[in-house]
Amino acid sequence: MAPSAPRMTQAEAQALCRVAHRESGVAIAPGKRAFLEMRIGRRLREIGCEDYRHYLQLLEGPGGRVERAHLVEALTTHTTAFFRERAHFEWLAEYGLPALLERGAGQSAPLTIWSAACSLGSEMWTAAMVTDRRLRGLRPGSDWAVIGTDISRRILRKAALAVFSADEIADLPEDFRRDYLLRTRAGPRPARFRIVPQLRSHARLAYANLVNLSPALMLTADVIFLRNVLIYFSHEDQRRVVSQVIARLRPGGYLLTGHSESLTCIPDGLRQVGSSIYHKE
Ligand SMILES: C[S@@+](CC[C@H](N)C(=O)[O-])C[C@H]1O[C@@H](n2cnc3c(N)ncnc32)[C@H](O)[C@@H]1O
């Protein structure tokens, strides 16, 4: 019989949520005990830790930094898809990229798009495909780059492979699959698809914690996708994240938030120009 899962007390739930919040900004209500037990219980079993009291000691003890990263891994959600919230990509092709080129983006530095909580990279690759296709028409030979960052090193390792299952590319239109994916497995095994080398040569992935952006992250961008991540933060952390992120947005650039994450208080210097699209003057 499988050993019974340890139960979490309210005090332990509060302490674990405090650690997760301190490390990542992710704000989980301690009342969500079933969720916490499911996600963190898995980790306890993996490392053979008998209960949450001992786990908390491990988190706060010497060497706890590594385990705190595992806690964040356990509590973050990585749902993503190609062409998620499609209107943003249509806007990028029809309006965003032409407007940026007109303002001189891509002349002294590559036109840069940052997917600031990139998960598996579907958002970054969608932006890359749209940019590649559009710039070929508008200004062939333009220099451009996409950068994906995330707090989860595990998801970044997967993203670096740039390999997707048939389910993961379900939302990618046929002509984009034809131009930008290579089938990696023949035969009876489930098909896998890899982003073509030409697109991969424009991309970079890096670790970044949005609630505490390191000055060592040398990055400014013309377009920043900050989507479906703000919802995990408290209002105070959301404001802090937005202000740190827009400090890295180049003048004339655009910030895109998730459709359900419109900024309630628009910071100075930003102007809303579309549904969850903001322009830096
Ligand atoms: C739901 S996914 C969103 C992916 C993509 N932006 C999209 O809209 O499809 C949220 C991502 O945010 C990342 N994340 C959570 N907290 C973060 C933080 N403090 N800094 C950076 N990334 C974070 C998670 O690891 C996860 O990959």
Image (cartoon, helix red, strand yellow):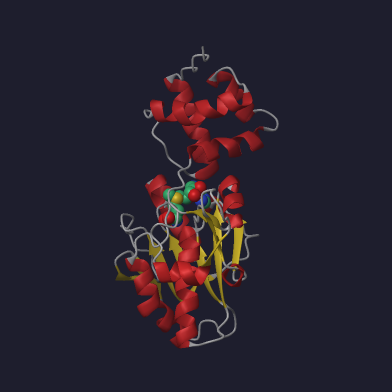
Q: Which residue lies at the image location 51% right of the left edge and 11% below the top edge?
A: 1
| Depicted 43 relative to depicted 238: above or below | above
Rendered residue at 55%/18% (across/down): 51
Specify the farthest residue to the front. 187
Q: Nearer the viewer, residue 104 or 129?
A: 129
The answer to whether residue 250 is seen in the rendering is yes
- Please give left or right for residue 53 compared with residue 175 in the image: right
Instruction: Tell which residue pokes out farthest to the top in this image.
Output: 1
How many discs appear? 0
Quarter of the figure with the C terminus: bottom left
> Residue 279 falls in which quadrant of the image?
bottom left
* Towards the viewer: 32 or 196: 196
**Quadrant of res 36:** top left
Q: Is residue 94 left or right of residue 14?
A: left
Residue visible at 50% across and 17% down? 6
Spot occupied by residue 204 in the image (x, y as percentages of width and height): 61, 64
Q: Position of residue 16 (x, y in %)?
A: 50, 30
Q: Nearer the viewer, residue 176 or 53?
A: 176
Does residue 249 appear in the picture of this structure?
A: no
Q: Is 157 displayed left or right of 11 in the figure? A: right
Residue 178 position within the rendered picture, expressed as x and y whole percent measured from the top left: 47, 70
Which residue is found at the position 49% from the left and 72% from the top? 179
The answer to whether residue 277 is above or below residue 94 is above
